Amino acid sequence: MKIERVASRFSVTALAALAGVHVAWGLGSSWPLPDREAFSDAVIRRPEAPGAVACHSVACALGAGALLVGGRPKQYPALSRLGGRWCGGRAGCAWPGRVSGRTDLLSPGSASARFRRLDRLVYSPLCLVLGASSAIATVRRHR
C-alpha cells in the first residue's frame, strides 16, 4: 500500500473520530473524564466547559478536514488539495508553542498544570502526527 493511502486513511479516521468526540462533548458528555470540571481542566484549560455551539463548530471543522484530506470533493481537486494542506499546516503551526509549554501564547487562557502535561504528552504529538499524515496524503496524492 502506498504511503499516501495509509496517511490518508489514518488522517481521515482520526479526524472523523475527533469530530465524533466533539459532537459527544457538545451533547454534554465528559468522556473520557469523570465530570465536566475535570474535562474542562484537561481539555481546554479553563474552569468552564465549552458550550454546544463551540463543540459542534469544531466537530464541523474536523469533519470538513476529514473530507478534504480524503480527497473530497473529487470534482474540485484544488479545493481538496488546499484544504488538506491547511489541515497539515494548522497542526504544524501549533507545534512550537506546545513544545515550549507556551500554548497560552497561541490560545490565551489560564493554563493549568494538568493541561500543560497532557498537551506535551498527548495533544502535541497527536497534532504533529495528524498534521504530517494529512500533508503527506494530500501533497503526494496530487503530484
Image: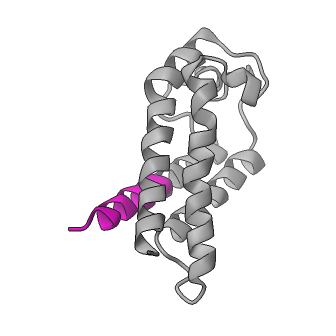
In the picture shown, does residue 104 fall above or below 7?
A: above
Residue at 67 percent of width and 51 percent of height = 58
In the picture shown, does residue 86 fall above or below 100?
A: below
Residue 102 on image: x %, y %:
66, 18
Is residue 11 a member of the stretch shown in magenta?
Answer: yes
Farthest residue in the top direction?
113
87 left or right of 45?
A: left
Residue at 68 percent of width and 47 percent of height = 55
Residue 46 on image: x %, y %:
73, 22
In the picture shown, does residue 4 fall above or below 99?
A: below
Most foreground residue, 40 or 124: 124
Most foreground residue, 20 or 115: 115
| Displayed quadrant of residue 59 | bottom right
Most foreground residue, 143 or 78: 143
**Residue 71 appears in the rendering:** yes
Magenta-drawn stretch, dominant element (helix, strand or loop) = helix
Is residue 53 a member of the stretch shown in magenta?
Answer: no
Farthest residue in the left direction?
1
Residue 37 on image: x %, y %:
65, 21
Which span of residues is magenta-colored? 1-15
What colour scheme does the image use?
one colour
Q: Quadrant of the N terminus?
A: bottom left
Residue 132 on image: x %, y %:
45, 49
In the picture shown, does residue 69 fall above or below 53?
A: below
Residue at 75 percent of width and 46 percent of height = 54
